[in-house]
């Protein structure tokens, strides 16, 4: 694709303009670059973003299987950001000043991200005061409703390797909070969570998989509304720090998406009238801090 676009330098077209046969708008230029790792190998599916001088995103995408990006952009000055799992993000500038021209930036090398120390093997627990279990969902097809659960507990057993670790989290279903009392009361009712019959949500992990860099997949069973389904958390490990009381803390951010029909949560009264009060997809957003089990903290 790229060789056809830029013109393959053969004996037939050697010396010709590589853009011949590919007319470009007079107010735009063709920006090209290739993303490589420290060993000179192409980085495929690296994410790139070009923003203008005001910080507005103009174009974004990912590199092709050969590490290339070929993109047509208006004339202007750009700030470029490139990221990929396991590499330190790249920041640079690009300038497209003359219309109808090729602007080759050449090869851009991403450097390996520094490794973060992993938690020591043993028993850890979620530190609730600095952890948030949040969610969002579409509301009657318009905006989004945001909420969280305020009461939960969790234990993590770190194995001799992270892949042999496990996690168990229990959430009090009645602690749901969307900042609207009437709505929260309804969400606790039999129409939705039915907290009298199903007072907790529980997650048991059964697999930790390293996806590269600081990214992990945590797979396990989520029990909600009396139904258990397999879910995978896309997790980003943020390392270890020493807290204000001298305690060791680890931090993870994780996301996933649930479908309420999988857990037989259907508000039939409204669905019968073809009104989807709550959208099918529920986005889960977790900010978790962990401490060694038994850590005594004065400020929680």
Image: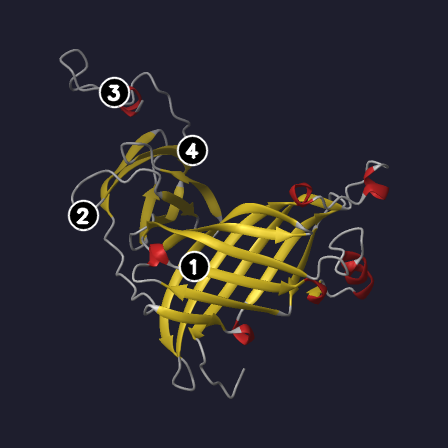
Per the model, the C-alpha gap separating discs 3 and 1 is: 53 Å
Q: Is residue 132 visible?
A: yes
Residue 11's place in the image compared with 176, above or below, is above
Q: Could you tell which of marks 3 and 4 lies nearer the N-terminus? A: 3
Which residue was labeled with disc 4?
27
Residue 128 lies, in percent from the top left, at 55, 73
Q: Which residue is drawn at 75% across and 57% down?
A: 197
Residue 133 lies, in percent from the top left, at 58, 63
Which residue was labeled with disc 3?
7
Quadrant containing the N terminus is top left
At mark 3, the secondary structure is: loop
Which residue was labeled with disc 1?
166
Which residue was labeled with disc 2?
38
Mark 2 and mark 3 residues within 8 Å of each other at the beta carbon: no
Q: Can residue 54 be seen in this view?
A: no
Per the model, the C-alpha gap separating discs 1 and 2 is: 34 Å
Residue 214 lies, in percent from the top left, at 35, 56
Q: Could you tell which of marks 4 and 2 lies nearer the N-terminus? A: 4
Residue 250's place in the image compared with 280, above or below, is below
Q: Which residue is drawn at 78% across and 46% down?
A: 277
């Amino acid at each position: 694709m790229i060789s056809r676009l830029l013109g393959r330098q053969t004996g037939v077209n050697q010396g010709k303009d590589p853009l011949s046969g590919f007319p470009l708008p007079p107010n735009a230029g063709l920006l090209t670059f290739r993303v490589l790792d420290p060993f000179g190998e192409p980085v495929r599916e690296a994410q790139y973003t070009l923003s203008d001088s005001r910080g507005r995103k103009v174009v974004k995408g990912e590199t092709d299987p050969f590490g290339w990006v070929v993109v047509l952009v208006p004339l202007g000055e750009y700030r470029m950001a490139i990221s990929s799992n396991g590499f330190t993000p790249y920041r640079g500038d690009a300038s497209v000043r003359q219309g109808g021209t090729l602007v080759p930036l050449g090869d851009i090398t991403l450097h390996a991200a520094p490794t973060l120390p992993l938690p020591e093997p043993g028993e850890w627990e979620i530190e609730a005061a600095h952890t948030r279990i949040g969610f969002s969902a579409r509301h009657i097809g318009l905006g989004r409703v945001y909420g969280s659960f305020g009461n939960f507990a969790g234990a993590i057993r770190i194995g001799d390797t992270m892949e042999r670790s496990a996690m168990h989290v229990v959430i009090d279903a009645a602690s749901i909070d969307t900042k609207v009392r009437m709505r929260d009361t309804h969400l606790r009712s039999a129409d939705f969570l039915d907290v009298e019959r199903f007072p907790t949500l529980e997650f048991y992990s059964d697999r930790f998989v390293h996806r590269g860099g600081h990214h992990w997949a945590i797979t396990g069973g989520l029990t909600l509304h009396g139904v258990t389904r397999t879910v995978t958390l896309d997790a980003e490990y943020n390392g270890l720090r020493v807290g204000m009381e001298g305690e060791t803390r680890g931090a993870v951010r994780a996301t996933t998406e649930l479908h309420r029909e999988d857990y037989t949560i259907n508000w039939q009264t409204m669905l019968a009238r073809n009104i989807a009060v709550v959208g099918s997809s529920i986005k889960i957003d977790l900010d978790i801090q962990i401490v060694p089990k038994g850590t005594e903290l004065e400020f929680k």
